[in-house]
Amino acid sequence: MKWKNRNLRELAHIICGDAAQSEVSYFRYRSSTFLTEFFEDCDLDFVHDGSTRWAWVSARLEEVLALPHSGPSVPPDAFIRIIRAVLDKGEAQKGDPDRSKALAALNVVLVREGWEAFYDESGVGQLRHLPTNSVAQLANPHRPMTPAELERRDQLTAYLNKCSEDELVEELLLPLFRQLGFHRITAAGHKDKALEYGKDVWMKYTLPTLHVLYFGIQAKKGKLDSAGVGKDGSANVAEIHNQVTMMLGHEIFDPELNRRVLVDHAFIVAGGEITKQARNWLGNKLDATKRSQVMFMDRDDILNLFIVTNLPLPKGALPPSSNPFDDLDDEIPF
């Protein structure tokens, strides 16, 4: 990521807590020692050398933005930590108890570079990429979850138990893969199976080198097993293998290029469990070339990714309204 020098300077002034144009600063003032502590809190080993504070911070920000990252819509993890530290609600200043003024001042700088900061439901500062409307996350799906995240995970689990296969694709998988950086996501749906050719979704992913890979998704609502006869709520893995083979062998039309292309990789996504026997069967069935083309996602993968990327829950997964007037008719006799 390359930022304009003007924006780097203004963000550096915000981190230093310098008052802007004779106005009261809504950010904590940081001297040399506190600047070093600030970057330590962001897991960066920068030590202030006694030079002009804003110039030194500006140079460090330039180094942070030059760190490796997965794409233009995902900044380096260190930069996300810096923004969250700047917006820490525990550092609210006089005249700005909810930090709304600090947020507005920070966004004046961020918007010029195509970003926007906001507070999520937990009061943690987040960063949104405006062109793609995706939220930059430190998305480690295997990290410990907060109590609020565990509650949302339980709500999403209940939704998976009752949703249809189309709802699994449209309400969960499409928003999730958009958030993860995939684009041109096209759902085949189940209304016309003759046009599906073994895939429920196809999509594109642009590498940092600007090369494009094509992905297909074969989604099943229930469990995938290796039983000869699929039980209620489960699907036979051999059937899924046949559909994945069709997906990898059938061309799709990319309207952005005006030509037909093959799918490079396939996701097998299950709203339930993919049993160990089913994974072993597929592993033995696929040869070395196709093995790298096929990836698995089961219910736990969907739940963890959906929660850590901070996506809003589908409407069907939200708890009932707590509006005290909802039961008014039951409480007032007529």
Image: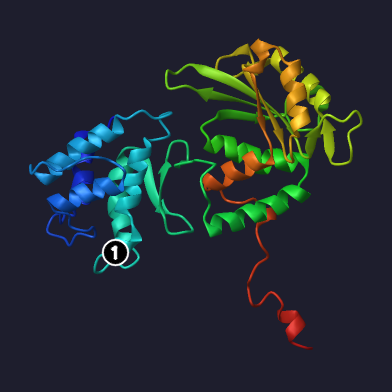
Identified at 65% across, 50% down, the residue is 314
55 relative to 285 in the view: left or right? left
- Where in the figure is residue 61, as x and y percent of width and height? 24, 38
* 289 is higher (above) or lower (below) than 189: above
- Where in the figure is residue 15, as x and y percent of width and height? 22, 49
Quarter of the image for residue 257 reads: top right
Q: Secondary structure at mark 1?
A: loop
Q: Nearer the viewer, residue 66 or 19?
A: 66
What colour scheme governs how the chains and residues are painted in the rendered image of this protein?
Answer: rainbow
- Where in the figure is residue 234, as x and y percent of width and height? 83, 37
Residue that numbered label 1 is attached to = 92
**Quadrant in the picture for the C terminus:** bottom right
* 107 is higher (above) or lower (below) than 89: above
Identified at 73% across, 43% down, the residue is 167
Question: How many callouts does the rendering have?
Answer: 1
Identified at 87% across, 30% down, the residue is 227
Residue 196 in view of the camera: no
Q: Amino acid at mark 1?
A: Ala
